[in-house]
Amino acid sequence: MWKPDDDPETNFVFVPDEIDCDKNNEIESKTESSACPCLCSCGGGGTELRCTGGRFSIPSNASKTVRSFIYSNNKLPNNTLTFGALAAFQHATLMILSSNSICVVESDAFDLCRNLTYLVLDNNQFVSSNVQPFLGPSATSLEFLSLRSVVASHEESASLWRLFNLLLSKETHHSSESERRFGNTFPSLRTLKLDGNFLTNINATNLKQALRWSCLRYFSLSHNWLQSDSMEVVLTLLDGCEQRINVKNISKNKSLAEIPLIEEASFSSTDVDMTFNNITGLEASFIKALKDRYLGDQPVSPYEIQRKLTFKLKENNFICNCSINETMCFLFKDKGKMIITDWKKLTCHQPDKGRLP
C-alpha cells in the first residue's frame, strides 16, 4: 500500500542458489562452502539471505559475505532485538526486519552494522517505555529508513518522536571523527517513511535535530491523522537542504555536475507524501511559504539553482467552504499545481463530496 518505486523491499530481486538439506537440518549451498541457515534461502552467490517465516531467532551462522538480509514474518525471543543478534551481518548494506512483532530494540543493537544504507523496520510494535538508542554509528551511513506502522495505537504514537530522539548515534570514546561531527543526525538519509503511525502532529524539535544534515528526496507521512498545520512544519524540516545554492565564486570552467554539494542538494527534488490524513485545506501561512520559497523569482544565473518540492494530498478531508478559494487561487493562478502534483485527485469532504470546485 505504501511502496513507491524506490522501496528496496519491492525492488529486491532474489535469485536462490541450488540448495540441499543435510543431516543436521541445515541447508547447504552447492555453490558456496558456508552453510545457509535452516528455514532460510540463500542467493546471489552467498551475498543474499532471506528468512521469511518460521524462525524464532536471527541466524548466527550466516556467511560473512551476506550483503542483503531479509528477516520478516518471524519471531524473536521475548519480542526483543538484542545487542549482538546482528553480529553476523557486519557487512550487510540492506536489512529488512519487518513484521516480527518487535517490541524492544536493545541499546546499540545495530552498533556493529556500520555499512547499512537501507533499513526497514515496518510493522513492528515499539513500546514507548522500551525505546532505547539502538542505531549507533549506522545512522551516519543510512540512506533509506522505513518506520511504517511501528506503533500499536494512537496512545503510543508519541513514542515515534521519542524514538527519533533516542535511536540516533550517541557519541562514545570509540566514535570516529565523522560520527562526532554529525552527532544525532542522518547525514546521508535520502528516504524517510513514517506512514501508518497514528500521528496527529509532527514533533519538529526531535525530527529537525535528526534531519539537520539531511537532504531528503522522499518523505512519506501517509495514513496518519495529521492536520493542515503539519504541512508548514514539514517545510521547516526541509530547511536544512538549501532551497537555493549560490555558487558564483566557483570557477566557471568547472562543470556543475563535478561539484558534489550542488549535485546532491540542488539537482534533486523533494517529494512529500501526505495522502490519507486529516488535512482540511491549505493554510494561508503555508501557501505564502511555498510561494516565497519555491514559486519565487527564477535564478538570475546558471550558478544559482532552484530546488523543487512536491506534495501529494489525495484522500484528505478538504472542507469546501469560502476558505477553499485561497487554495484554488494558489493552484490555478499561482502555479501551485507544480507543487501539489495530485491536485486532480483532491476531493471535498464537506459539505458535498466530489472534486474541488
Image: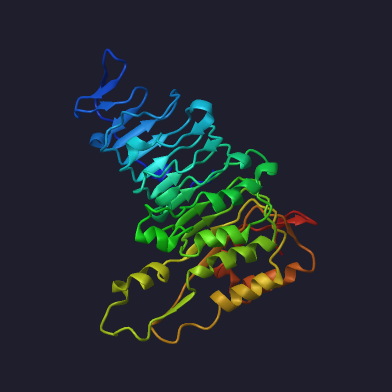
Q: Can residue 4 be seen in this view?
A: no
Please tell me which residue lies in front, 150 or 182: 182
Q: Which residue is drawn at 36% across and 32% down?
A: 50
Whether 206 is drawn above or below 33: the answer is: below
Residue 97 placed where, x, y %? 45, 37
Q: In which quarter of the image is residue 294?
A: bottom right
Please tell me which residue lies in front, 248 or 132: 132
Q: Which residue is drawn at 65% across and 72% down?
A: 287
Residue extending farthest front:
173
Left or right: 350, with 270 as reference point: right
Q: In which quarter of the image is the N terminus?
A: top right
Please tell me which residue lies in front, 319 or 161: 161
Residue 346 placed where, x, y %? 65, 58
Residue 242 placed where, x, y %? 48, 73
Q: Residue at x 56, y 35 (%)?
A: 103
Q: Is residue 293 visible?
A: yes
Residue extending farthest top:
23
Left or right: 279, with 92 as reference point: right
Residue 49 placed where, x, y %? 33, 33
Q: Quadrant of residue 119?
A: top left
Q: In which quarter of the image is the C terminus?
A: bottom right
